[in-house]
Amino acid sequence: MLPEELAGRIREECGDVLLLDPARAWAILTDSGRLLEVCRNLKNIGFIRALNMTANHLGGRDFHLYLTLRHGERHDASLTLKWKFTLLDEAAEPEPGEESAPAYAGQSVHPSLSLIWRAVELMEREIFEFFGIPFAGNQNLVGLILDPQLQGFPLRRDFRAASHENYAEKLLEERADRAVRGVMHDPQF
Amino acid sequence: MTRSSDRRVEIRRDPLLTEKLIYSVGPQHPSLPSPLELRVQADGELIERVTPELGYMHRGVEQLVTQRNYGQAAGLISRCEWLAGSNADWLVADAIERIEGITVPARSQWLRTLVLELSRIGNHLFWFGNLGLEAGAYTPIFIAMREREMLLDLLEMLSGHRHHHGWIVPGGVRNAPPEDFSGHVRAFCLWFRGRLDEYEDFFSDNAIWINRSELIGTLEPDYAFEYGATGPVLRASGIAHDLRRDQPYAMYGELDVQVPTGEFGDVLDRYRVRFLEMRESLRIIEACLGNIGGDAPLRDPDVNPDPEALTVSRGEVYTAVESPRGELGLTLVSDGTNRPSRMHLRAPSLYHLFLLDELCRGYLLADLFVIYGSLDIMIGEVDK
């Protein structure tokens, strides 16, 4: 739900790039290049809580991303923002003064929203792990759940068994090897 | 009793530069009800850092649901939240109803509200039993399971299942309650209210328990907000946010839902908030009982009852429920077929789990599991 007065403020602040549907508490960002600006505006309006962020692979290099926010004082007000992101081949050039993300050379990067909402850090880690979208500026962009040896991104449409071919066998071999070597635990803190 | 200051110890830099100890707790550990590894860095007995290591229970649910029909998808999502699985059933049903514009009959909405509250009590009872174990008390788990069994009997009477009920379906509920259901629920409420008083007598005011929980694992409201805390964890920090009251769904809008809050955000406040919630759930359940009888329809006749034949129009929606652990959310993207194109579960436990580092820092190792227990983490919804 999005109360009318808040919808009015959102239209004032970001009306030219948002298709707003207050009845569904839904907004579509038409110009993804202005994502950070729109997010900062939404936070200034009072959407200080990031509740959820996820992605959907459309096929090829295209993704939809969804971010659900809730107002800090008006607990009855929430908004889901949707935008499109295309993963490019070349690494995006970082803006002067911004942190680069050399680890993802060969892919483009999505700007991290974790500097605006701290909770987004975990959500971006999840998206990175399952969709392979790198977020520039996320200080802790490592997987959360999957085995680090798994190749590929399981929630992409093109994820096939080939990308983890013989995965189970390799895993068993690795475990057997570790058992032979007497490795019980590898404390990589 | 008034609480004046945090018992967190300021971590000092060790002038002798002694080696820190890193403990690996789990994934199989008596204090962890679900598989999870906690890497704990400690200086002597003081916790400096806690890092959760996840993935021991990952089943690929979000990938699997895209290959199954909506009925099967609801069952899989429910298996992420097995203690109160009806919340997941409700989420899937509500997402479909929002996309399709389905109006659920009022009688079904009352029944759904009743089941969600029964599930909340069932979950909190499990939490109470486990928390007792974390604190070294064996009695709570036995008495909590006694009451929980009675409650599961009620849910079985209603749905035929004790855990994954699958009873809340798109358009309504699967079947009418048996004739004597209301009487059994009333009897349970009467019995359980007396047992709650008993718990309070022997546990809530117990000096040992208060000493273990008071001003331990304090969470500031700003920090809770910033890091995505919801549900009892957020409310214990003093923020009165509850979806049942603030964004009412089912029949909560008809009920004056009271939202208990804490003051200090410590283990004791999280404990007290959940106890007050169980009392509030009893009140809601009794209010629902007067509206579930009669012959009014239970399901929108336009919704296809065959899950395989149920197709959902192209659309996207985010919906959320105030689960016993906090805001359980679902993002559904439908492409017009009988299978979801994308389904994502927002798990409150994920955010609460990563609060552990902040909550435990500066406390003693012995406090780790009391703090962990107070958060009521469900690894199934985190690992998915």
Image (cartoon, helix red, strand yellow):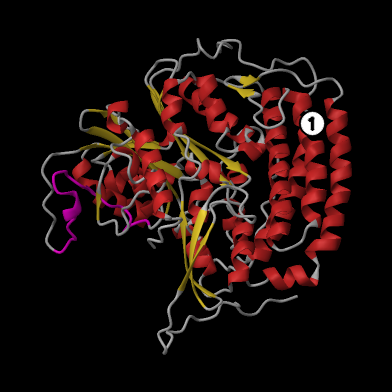
Q: With respect to residue B185, does A148 lie above or below?
A: below
Indicate whether A175 appears above or below B305: below
Q: Position of residue B242 (x, y in %)?
A: 60, 48
Amino acid found under the numbered disc labelled 1: Leu
Q: Is residue A88 left or right of residue B295?
A: left
Q: Is residue B354 above or below residue A145?
A: below
Q: What residue sits right under mark 1 in the picture?
A: B154
Q: Is residue B66 visible?
A: yes
Assign a secondary structure to mark 1: helix
Q: Is residue B199 magenta?
A: no
Quarter residue B46 falls in: bottom right
Residue A116 picture location, percent across and down? 33, 57
Tell me: B193 left or right of B60.
right
User: Along the line of sight, which residue is nearer the eye, B27 or A46?
Assistant: B27
Q: Is residue B44 left or right of residue B214?
A: left
Marker count (numbered): 1
Q: Is residue A101 magenta?
A: yes
Whether B171 is drawn above or below B60: the answer is above
Closest to the observer: B128 or B335? B128
**In the picture, residue B269 is in which quadrant?**
bottom right
Image quadrant for the N terminus of chain B? bottom right
Q: Nearer the viewer, residue B191 or A158?
A: A158
> At 43% across and 37% down in the image, what residue appears?
A25
Specify the subunit that label 1 lies on.
B
Identity of the residue drawn at 62% across and 42% down = B244
Q: Position of residue B87 (x, y in %)?
A: 61, 35
Magenta segment: A97-117
The residue positioned farthest toward the front in the image shown: A180
